[in-house]
Image: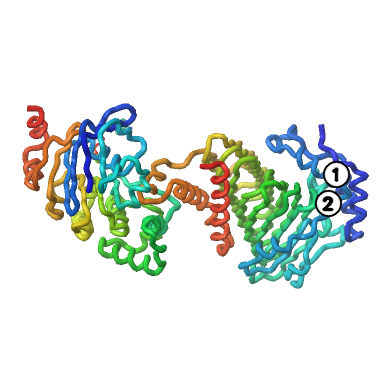
């Protein structure tokens, strides 16, 4: 589904990704771990299409197409979803409005009619209930004044409404209380299917107790320096990143 | 140099107007206008707004024998559709009785007695008095159940036209009224209208006022709203300037009674070739009293906006609480804004604050929306509408908020298409 080869990407003239390769197949869940500043969010943003990042070489294929040719909105309509590490506050735009616009943008792209207003509300309420979100969040400005955890839940709500083929969740587990973590994990697990793929960027093994990954990768200095199964996350928790760095440099 | 109008032509034109009983008012208007001429950019209040064009149009119109365009009744019907209100429709200066059900209400009608009007004030007040056809007088003694809609529907299809609109509105003690002043225009020829509304709010009365200016972008207008508030009166205003090549609005609020409060909010949207100028002046003559003001502007292409908010706290007006803010969003770099708050304080115990900003769309928010599948242009419109929403949603006639929000967005869509952004 997603095939990244020898990707180099820079921002403001600084090369952040330095030859990153990663293949994620349909039906798989991959976890990406790695020290602060290693380039995890950069990777997520390059996949989503952030224009400040310049891809200097390498390729990213999504369902056999060149992903880098598409604008962020086209990627979203094609089924890519990025859960932001730092969701953006948009005062004056109400949450329900954004959700509906996003759902309809995708439906239009798929040649479907706009979602019925009643249907939309019903669906949104259902998804919110599952995430333990008060329906009143529908009428608030997007992320405006939301607590850290509320913002993360709101990202998952958007994901649940959009049902992406490829979800990249950048530290969606950070800042969540235990109940929220479980709710978010359930939201992610509900999305798991043979046609979809999920990339989880996380610092904590804890999330992986709830969402069992097929593969775990360690990103360091813009490269994947180690990959393994879920036991790699446990090993990391025990030994820290120094251990992989040393192993990579050896 | 003054932008003068030929007085003899003005007199000839006035002689042919309806309601000969208004001759005295018209003559007084000519006198003021002849003495002052159209203000030029040398006058501080008109520094950024050049009336040379509208003066030339007015001269040409007078020279052509002051032609009056047929009213565009289609334009009137469109504006009236879907709004439940009592209507007064003024087309090119004439009241259209067939569309004006409000004339059947007590206290509302075309005023033909010159003594009912205050002396003309300023050059534009003089012009208005000199050429006014059907001045309207409204006295609200009992609160109205529906908004009073004042529709100014101008047109210039055959040749250039100028029009004067004058409305004098008094709200009696304890009464309440909602006013919707809506300005639209059509036709490819030049049009200049000069609108003057006077509003007198007696003690304990209340007026919610919404003004929506959607003139054709080839047309120009100067407009003025003079408000006087007596004790414990309340005035909540929201104005939107979306159209017009040159649009100037003067809003003057005179707080003459203790406990009065005024909210003056507005939004303006201007695209290529548009010049929109909002001047407000709040005179706090007594205290305690409160005034709140926030104008927001959106500009794209070669657009020019002026905002000047003056607050004067007179000696003895202790307990005054006044706030003024003006925020501008530039969608492109060519647009220009001159924003100036002016505070003059002659009292001791006052609370005053003001601020202005000029900024751009939040790129992070734009990107966030795009990652949700929303196209770039749509995302820009959503964010721009949100920028305006904080004031649009304060429009005191709640039933009009969506109409105004949609009008703002539609105008933005046209402007963005025009500049290809
Ligand atoms: N605009 C920029 N100019 C220069 N350097 C930048 C810019 N934006 C990000 N960087 C740098 O890129 C590097 C990678 O950042 P990134 O956000 O991808 O890290 P991360 O792995 O997600 O870290 P964390 O675990 O803290 O979220 C960091 O060193 C960061 O300082
Ligand atoms: Mg990060």
What residue appears at the point 40 percent right and 51 percent down from the top-left corner? B374
Relative image position of residue B67 (x, y in whole percent): 85, 52
Q: In this view, does B83 lie to the left or right of B166?
A: left
Vertical comparison of B153 with A119: above or below: above
Q: Can residue B296 be seen in this view?
A: yes
Question: Residue B410: percent from the left, percent from the top?
Answer: 56, 53
Of residue A134 and residue A183, the one placed in the foreground of this image is: A183
Mark 1 vs ligand 1: CB under 8 Å? no
Whether B291 is drawn above or below B399: the answer is above
Dot 1: element: helix
Residue A186: quarter of image: bottom left
In the picture, the disc for residue A206 is none
B235 and A55: which one is in front?
A: A55
- CA gap between label 2 and label 1 equals 9 Å
Q: Which colour scheme is used?
A: rainbow
Image quarter for residue B96? bottom right
Q: Could you say whether the residue bearing mark 2 is in a helix, strand or loop?
A: helix
Q: Local crowd at mark 1 within 10 Å, few (<14), some, or many (≥20)?
A: many
Judge left or right: residue A216 versus residue A141.
left
Horizontal side of B39 relative to A145 (left or right) equals right
Do the residues under discs 2 and 1 have CB atoms within 8 angstroms?
yes
> Residue B185: x percent and y percent?
70, 54
- Pointer 1: what residue? B32
């Amino acid at each position: 589904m997603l095939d990244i080869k020898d990707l180099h990407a820079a921002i403001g003239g600084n090369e952040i990704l330095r030859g990153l390769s990663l293949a994620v197949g349909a039906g798989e869940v991959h976890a990406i771990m790695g020290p602060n500043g290693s380039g995890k969010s950069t990777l997520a943003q390059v996949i989503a299409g952030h224009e400040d990042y310049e891809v200097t070489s390498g390729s990213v294929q999504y369902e056999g197409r060149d992903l880098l040719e598409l604008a962020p909105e086209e990627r979203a309509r094609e089924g890519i979803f990025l859960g932001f590490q730092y969701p953006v506050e948009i005062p004056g735009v109400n949450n329900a409005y954004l959700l509906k616009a996003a759902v309809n943008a995708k439906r239009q792209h798929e040649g479907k009619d706009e979602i019925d207003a009643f249907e939309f509300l019903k669906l949104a309420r259902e998804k919110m209930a599952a995430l333990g979100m008060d329906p009143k969040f529908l009428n608030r400005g997007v992320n405006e004044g939301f607590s850290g955890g509320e913002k993360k839940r709101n990202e998952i709500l958007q994901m649940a409404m959009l049902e992406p083929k490829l979800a990249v969740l950048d530290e969606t587990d950070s800042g969540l209380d235990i109940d929220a973590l479980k709710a978010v994990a359930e939201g992610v697990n509900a999305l798991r299917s043979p046609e979809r793929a999920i990339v989880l960027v996380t610092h904590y093994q804890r999330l992986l107790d709830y969402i069992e990954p097929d593969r775990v990768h360690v990103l360091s200095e813009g490269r994947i320096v180690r990959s393994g199964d879920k036991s790699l996350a446990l090993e990391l928790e025990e030994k820290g990143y120094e251990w992989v760095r040393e192993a990579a440099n050896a | 140099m003054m932008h003068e109008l030929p007085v003899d032509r003005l007199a000839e034109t006035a002689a042919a107007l309806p309601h000969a009983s208004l001759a005295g008012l018209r003559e007084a208007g000519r006198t003021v206008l002849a003495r002052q001429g159209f203000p030029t950019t040398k006058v501080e209040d008109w520094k950024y707004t050049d009336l040379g064009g509208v003066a030339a149009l007015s001269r040409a119109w007078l020279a052509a024998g002051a032609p009056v365009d047929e009213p565009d009744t289609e334009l009137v019907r469109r504006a009236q559709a879907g709004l439940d209100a009592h209507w007064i429709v003024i087309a090119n200066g004439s009241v259209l009785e067939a569309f004006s059900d409000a004339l059947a209400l007590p206290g509302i009608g075309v005023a033909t007695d010159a003594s009912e009007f205050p002396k003309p004030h300023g050059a534009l007040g003089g012009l208005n008095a000199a050429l006014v056809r059907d001045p309207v007088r409204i006295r609200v003694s009992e609160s109205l159940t529906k908004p009073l809609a004042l529709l100014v529907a101008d047109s210039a299809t055959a040749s250039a036209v100028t029009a004067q609109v004058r409305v004098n509105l008094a709200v009696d003690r304890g009464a309440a009224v909602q006013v919707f002043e809506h300005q639209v225009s059509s036709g490819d020829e030049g049009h200049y209208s000069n609108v003057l509304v006077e509003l007198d709010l007696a003690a304990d009365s209340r007026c919610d006022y919404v003004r929506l200016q959607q003139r054709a972008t080839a047309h120009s207008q100067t407009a003025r709203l003079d408000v006087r508030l007596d004790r414990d009166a309340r005035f909540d205003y929201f104005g939107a300037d979306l159209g017009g090549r040159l649009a100037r609005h003067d809003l003057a609020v005179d707080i003459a009674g203790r406990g009065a409060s005024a909210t003056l909010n507005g939004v303006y949207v201007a695209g290529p070739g548009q010049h929109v100028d909002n001047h407000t002046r709040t005179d706090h003559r007594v205290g305690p009293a409160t005034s709140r003001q926030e104008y927001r502007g959106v500009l794209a292409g070669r657009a020019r906006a002026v905002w000047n908010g003056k607050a004067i706290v007179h000696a003895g007006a202790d307990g005054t609480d006044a706030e003024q803010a003006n925020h501008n969003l530039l969608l492109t770099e060519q647009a220009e804004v001159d924003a100036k708050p002016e505070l003059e304080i002659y009292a001791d115990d006052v609370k005053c604050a003001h601020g202005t900003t000029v900024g751009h769309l939040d790129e992070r928010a734009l990107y966030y929306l795009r990652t949700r599948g929303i196209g770039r242009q749509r995302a820009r419109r959503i964010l721009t509408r949100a920028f305006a929403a904080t004031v649009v949603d304060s429009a005191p006639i709640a039933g009009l908020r969506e109409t105004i929000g949609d009008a703002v967005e539609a105008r933005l869509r046209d402007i963005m298409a025009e500049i290809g952004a």
